[in-house]
Image: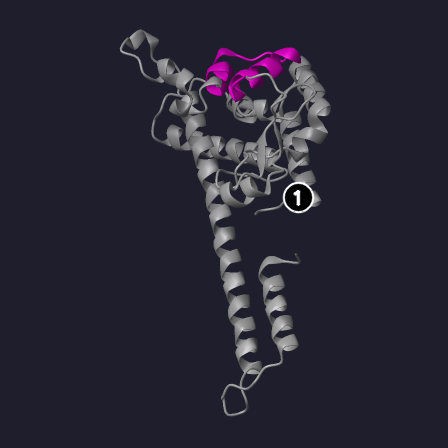
């Protein structure tokens, strides 16, 4: 499983706060700083998902994912511009919506959205590193994000609301009426939602690829250790001519125990 060092988590947090300072101004900046000061400790530690095969299911994964989505959104906007798409929103609106699309994953004012999964079976067999906090009142992640922004009296434009609301695309059933309509008057008036959904999907898939690569490398490492230790066992069980010899039980037990510990850690 991917892990971020404390230094990396701090660097990500500093980068996010610097982006806030450089993007927003006036009373909205003050309100944003108030909210981020309030959630700093919890937000720095929050994962972006609960299962390792989803994306960024590790401590600090939330902030890292938010930064990825912002970066992808800015890049994708340029792709749309270069292909003569209509852009009727500002960079500030794009960054604001990308920054807060998953804000609900922080939790409510007092409780975390994700808590560590204490079931070893679920961790091992389902890859469930974190689980949803049963003490929270039910809200969708998007609804909770909008609630938190409202609680801290952080205003947003119509473009920001539409972008934030629809970032999950058709993965969220409530978004269907926005994306699919037989009435042309009800079609989206801005491309911000499409760009944000693409950015979120892009960041999520890249993070999932990083996890897969890490698993593959870990498996290769374990296989190499297994072969090396198995080779040591065979060497100890043969004489100089390669013929099997009688092995002392204590020596075999020790080698077997070493092999187990190398592959799986101390019991």
Question: Residue 112: image x %, image y %?
Answer: 65, 26
Q: Which of 157 and 62 is in front in this view?
A: 62
Question: Residue 140: image x %, image y %?
Answer: 51, 19
Residue in the image at 60% along x and 39% along y: 119
Q: Residues within 10 Å of mark 1 (few under 14, many from 20)?
A: few
Q: Which of 132 and 159 is in front in this view?
A: 132
Q: Mark 1 points at which residue?
A: 8
Helix, strand or loop under label 1: helix
Residue in the image at 34% along x and 9% along y: 186
Question: Residue 223: image x %, image y %?
Answer: 50, 64
Quadrant where the C terminus lies? Answer: bottom right
Residue 141 shown in magenta: yes
Residue in the image at 54% along x and 17% along y: 139
Question: Residue 148: image x %, image y %?
Answer: 62, 16
Residue 89 shown in magenta: no
Q: In this view, does 91 lie above or below 1?
A: above
**Along the horizontal axis of the image, is 42 left or right of 212?**
right
Choose top left, top right, bottom left or bottom right for residue 22.
top right
């Amino acid at each position: 499983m991917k892990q971020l060092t404390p230094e990396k988590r701090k660097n990500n947090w500093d980068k996010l706060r610097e982006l806030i300072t450089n993007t927003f101004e006036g009373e909205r900046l003050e309100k944003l700083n108030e909210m981020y000061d309030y959630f700093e400790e919890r937000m720095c530690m929050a994962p972006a998902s609960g299962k390792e095969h989803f994306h960024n299911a590790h401590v600090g994964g939330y902030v890292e994912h938010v930064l990825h989505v912002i970066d992808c959104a800015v890049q994708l906007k340029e792709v749309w511009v270069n292909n003569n798409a209509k852009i009727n929103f500002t960079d500030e609106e794009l960054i604001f919506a990308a920054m807060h699309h998953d804000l609900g994953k922080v939790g409510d004012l007092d409780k975390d959205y994700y808590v560590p999964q204490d079931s070893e079976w679920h961790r091992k067999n389902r890859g469930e590193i974190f689980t949803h906090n049963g003490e929270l009142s039910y809200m969708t992640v998007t609804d909770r994000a909008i609630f938190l922004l409202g609680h801290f009296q952080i205003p947003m434009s119509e473009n920001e609301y539409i972008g934030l609301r629809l970032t999950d695309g058709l993965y969220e059933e409530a978004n269907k009426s926005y994306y699919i309509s037989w009435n042309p008057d009800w079609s989206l008036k801005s491309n911000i939602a499409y760009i944000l959904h693409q950015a979120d999907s892009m960041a999520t898939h890249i993070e999932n690829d990083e996890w897969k690569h890490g698993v593959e490398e870990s498996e290769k490492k374990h296989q190499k250790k297994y072969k090396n230790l198995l080779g040591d066992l065979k060497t100890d069980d043969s004489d100089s001519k390669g013929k099997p010899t009688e092995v002392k039980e204590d020596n075999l037990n020790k080698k077997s125990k070493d092999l187990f510990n190398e592959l799986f850690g101390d019991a």
